[in-house]
Image (tube, rainbow, N blue to C red):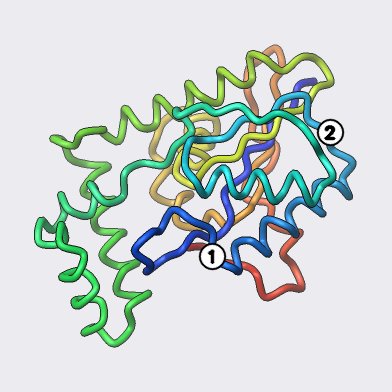
Amino acid sequence: MPTIYLIRHAQASFGRSDYDRLSPQGEQQAAVLGEALAERGLKPSLVVRGAMRRHAQTAEIALRAAGLDVPVEVDEGLNEFDHDQVIVAYKPAYKRRAVLLADLARSGHPARAFQEMFSAATQRWVEGEGYPESFAAFCQRSEDAVRRTAARVGKGETAFVFTSGGPIAAVASRLLAGSDDLWLKLNPVTINTAITKLTSGRSGLTVVSYNDHGHLDGTELLTYR
């Protein structure tokens, strides 16, 4: 039976001017992930990633740590939604990054304040209209990208897909609930480098496990952002 492993990227550089780059902790996470993939004896016949730098870096470090020298293809359908557009639509003043950072600093708890603001912004996106990419369009292109990969994996073969938490939650929601209704619950709990396992059979794609992060147990590397 074909198997697809959806792998969330390692921790990016939250709070930095260039978010789309792994943090030092993220680099460690990616290496631990690769070692775990090697311990499982997984040898993918296909590796696909999104077009973002954090996807590329996670794939590169993990595959190297796993001892796998395989080609990696790019599918932009696996990219995360544009969180900047979602935030600015929620509060236009945040188009100026300095205003956002100042508001977060004044809260006394920047990480918590950002999460509360971001949750409200994504809720508005899920329920609203007028975005360059609607929530429904995002979920559809995420599903389409994963199905493109699944269609290329033969019997007994395995694919690694390096992407983001948003697309993984979108695909999982559609497969588990038949709708996008679970996304708001699944997306926030997706852990960096967590693995979601899908199988492809006569009945289509099935979620076997979601957000598996056992390779981070016993470490101080577990992060959500």
Q: Residue at 52% of width from left, 49% of height from top?
A: 54
The residue tagged 2 is: 43
Give above or below for 217 relative to 70.
Answer: below
Question: Within the image, what quadrant is residue 141 found in?
Answer: top left
Q: CA distance from mark 2 to mark 1?
A: 27 Å
Give above or below for 16 relative to 81.
Answer: below
In the rendering, at what x and y percent does residue 220 appear? 67, 75
Do tag 2 and tag 1 residues touch (Cβ < 8 Å)? no
Q: Residue at 39% of width from left, 25% of height from top?
A: 140
User: Which one is in front in this view, the residue at disc 2 or the one at disc 1?
Assistant: 1
Q: Quadrant of the N terminus?
A: top right
Most extreme residue toward the bottom is 108
Say which label, 2 or 1, has the lower sequence index: 1
Give above or below for 224 relative to 62.
Answer: below
Q: Residue at 44% of width from left, 37% of height from top?
A: 79
* Crowd around label 2: few <14 · some 14–19 · many ≥20 (10 Å): some
Question: Within the image, what quadrant is residue 4 found in?
Answer: top right
In the rendering, at what x and y percent does residue 157 appear? 80, 22
Q: Nearer the viewer, residue 17 or 9?
A: 17
Q: Amino acid at mark 2?
A: Lys
Question: Within the image, what quadrant is residue 25 found in?
Answer: bottom right
The residue tagged 1 is: 23
Q: Amino acid at mark 1?
A: Ser
In the rendering, at what x and y percent does residue 122 appear? 28, 51
Most extreme residue toward the left is 93
Question: What is the secondary structure assignment of the residue under circle 1?
Answer: loop
Question: What is the secondary structure assignment of the residue under circle 2?
Answer: loop
In the rendering, at what x and y percent does residue 102 appear? 20, 77
Q: Nearer the viewer, residue 31 or 212?
A: 31
- Could you say which disc has been placed on residue 192 in the image? none
